Amino acid sequence: MDKKVIIEVFGVKETVPQSSGCGCGPKQTMGEMYDEFEALIQKSDISSEVEVKFIDVEKDDIDTYDYIKVALESGYSLPLTAVNQKVRFQGKVPYMQIYRLIKRSL
């Protein structure tokens, strides 16, 4: 495969995502979720096929990420996970769902 799949996680590194009020939401910060996700990807059989990065929406310039600006304006919850510039997941970084999505596309 010549071109890598780009996985971008947009969030606020030191912030725990908002839950629905039930107290059942994630307890990890968005940065911790990303670090765990990145480590799992690096150990997986798709590691050479993907590139992962974290973009902090409060510290990094997101002006070039129109697809994220639209998602945020539409009320999507952070963290947002995009695969090849398409927002696929919100509110968490679901490793297995992303893994299966990538495997199907390879």
Image (spheres, helix red, strand yellow):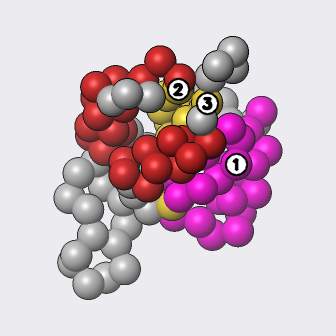
Mark 1 to mark 2 CA distance (whole Å): 15 Å
Give me the disc on residue 33. Answer: none
Question: How dense is the environment of label 3, judged by Cα within 10 Å: few (below 14), some, or many (20 and up)?
Answer: many
Q: Position of residue 105 (x, y in %)?
A: 62, 42
Mark 3 secondary-structure assignment: strand
Q: Quadrant of residue 37?
A: top left
Mark 1 secondary-structure assignment: strand
Q: Which residue is under mark 1?
A: 86
Q: Are marks 3 and 2 in contact (CB under 8 Å)?
A: yes
Q: In which quarter of the image is residue 38?
A: top left
Q: Which residue is under mark 2?
A: 50
Instruction: Give the mark, 3 or 2, whose residue is nearer the N terminus.
Output: 3
Give amino acid for label 2.
Val
**Magenta stretch containing residue 50, yes or no?**
no
Q: Where is residue 65 in the image (x, y as percent from the top left)?
A: 73, 39
Q: Where is residue 81 in the image (x, y as percent from the top left)?
A: 53, 48
Mark 3 to mark 2 CA distance (whole Å): 5 Å
Q: Give the range drawn in magenta.
A: 64-89
Q: Where is residue 61 in the image (x, y as percent from the top left)?
A: 66, 30
Q: Which residue is depicted at the point 46% across and 50% down?
A: 100
Q: In this view, does 48 lie to the left or right of 69?
A: left
The answer to whether any part of residue 18 appears in the image is yes
Mark 1 to mark 3 CA distance (whole Å): 11 Å
Instruction: Give the mark, 1 or 2, whose residue is nearer the N terminus.
Output: 2
Q: Which residue is under mark 3?
A: 5
Give amino acid for label 3.
Val
Instruction: Give the mark, 1 or 3, whose residue is nearer the N terminus.
Output: 3
- Quadrant placement of the C terminus: top right
Q: Which residue is depicted at the point 37% across and 67% down?
A: 18
Mark 2 secondary-structure assignment: strand
Q: Which residue is depicted at the point 53% across and 23% down?
A: 49
